[in-house]
Image (spheres, rainbow, N blue to C red):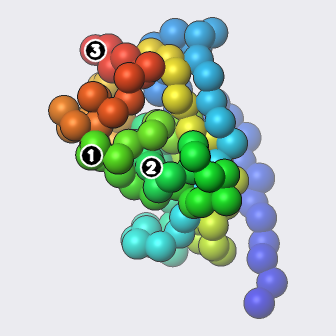
């Protein structure tokens, strides 16, 4: 099966409250459990709270983890239609909570010690 990549131009969704102050790690975003949208694309939205052990072991894939296992916040929309894909996890910074696809749980907020969620 061949893959076709579509290039989209425009301004990506911004989840940072202060875009000049953050730290992000490169991660591989897992495609397991991601439901395709109306166009058949499997997109993990920016602002998804992720975990999966990627901080301790960079071979582990990032998965949705809005709980005590949270390790970061997905920086940009990530297309996993054709399998796991590269992304970035914010591990330190100020996140605009109103721009997230789902409100962070209290457990996730506690786990993300260097991430501040601001209205």
Number of the front mark, 3 or 1 = 1
In the rendered image, which residue does mark 2 sit on? Answer: 51
Of pointers 3 and 1, the one earlier in the residue sequence? 1
Residue 119 is tagged as: 3
In the orientation shown, which residue stands out farthest toward the front? Answer: 56
**How would you rate the neighbour count of disc 3 (Cα within 10 Å): few for under 14, some for 14-19, many for 20 or more?**
few
In the orientation shown, which residue stands out farthest toward the bottom? Answer: 1
Q: Secondary structure at mark 3?
A: loop
- Residue at the (78%, 77%) spot, across then down: 3
The reply to whether the C-beta atoms of the residues labelled 2 and 1 are less than 8 Å apart is yes
Of pointers 2 and 3, the one earlier in the residue sequence? 2
Task: Give the answer, above or below, for where 50 lies relative to 22.
Answer: below
Q: Quadrant of the C terminus?
A: top left
- Residue at the (56%, 38%) spot, across then down: 89
- Image coordinates for residue 42, horizontal then vertical, percent: 51, 67
**How would you rate the neighbour count of disc 2 (Cα within 10 Å): few for under 14, some for 14-19, many for 20 or more?**
many
Q: Secondary structure at mark 1?
A: loop
Could you tell me if residue 79 is visible in this image?
no
Q: Nearer the viewer, residue 15 or 11?
A: 15
In the rendered image, which residue does mark 1 sit on? Answer: 67
Report, in whole angstroms, how far the alpha carbon at label 2 lies from the one at label 1: 9 Å
Could you tell me if residue 34 is visible in this image?
yes
**How would you rate the neighbour count of disc 1 (Cα within 10 Å): few for under 14, some for 14-19, many for 20 or more?**
some
- Image coordinates for residue 67, horizontal then vertical, percent: 27, 46
Q: Is residue 10 left or right of residue 109?
A: right
- Residue at the (51%, 41%) spot, across then down: 74
- Image coordinates for residue 82, horizontal then vertical, percent: 65, 74
- Residue at the (47%, 37%) spot, across then down: 72
Report, in whole angstroms, how far the alpha carbon at label 3 lies from the one at label 1: 20 Å
Q: Secondary structure at mark 2?
A: strand
Task: Give the answer, above or below, for where 54 lies relative to 99.
Answer: below
């Amino acid at each position: 099966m061949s893959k076709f990549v579509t290039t989209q131009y425009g301004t990506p969704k911004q989840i940072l409250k202060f875009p000049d102050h953050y730290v992000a790690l490169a991660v591989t975003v897992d495609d397991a459990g991601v439901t395709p949208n109306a166009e058949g694309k499997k997109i993990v939205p920016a602002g998804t709270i992720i975990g999966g052990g990627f901080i301790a072991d960079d071979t582990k894939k990032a998965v949705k983890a809005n709980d005590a296992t949270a390790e970061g916040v997905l920086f940009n929309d990530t297309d996993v239609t054709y399998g796991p894909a590269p992304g970035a996890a914010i591990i330190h910074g100020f996140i605009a909570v109103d721009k997230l696809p789902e409100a962070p749980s209290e457990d996730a907020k506690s786990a993300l010690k260097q991430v501040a969620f601001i209205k």
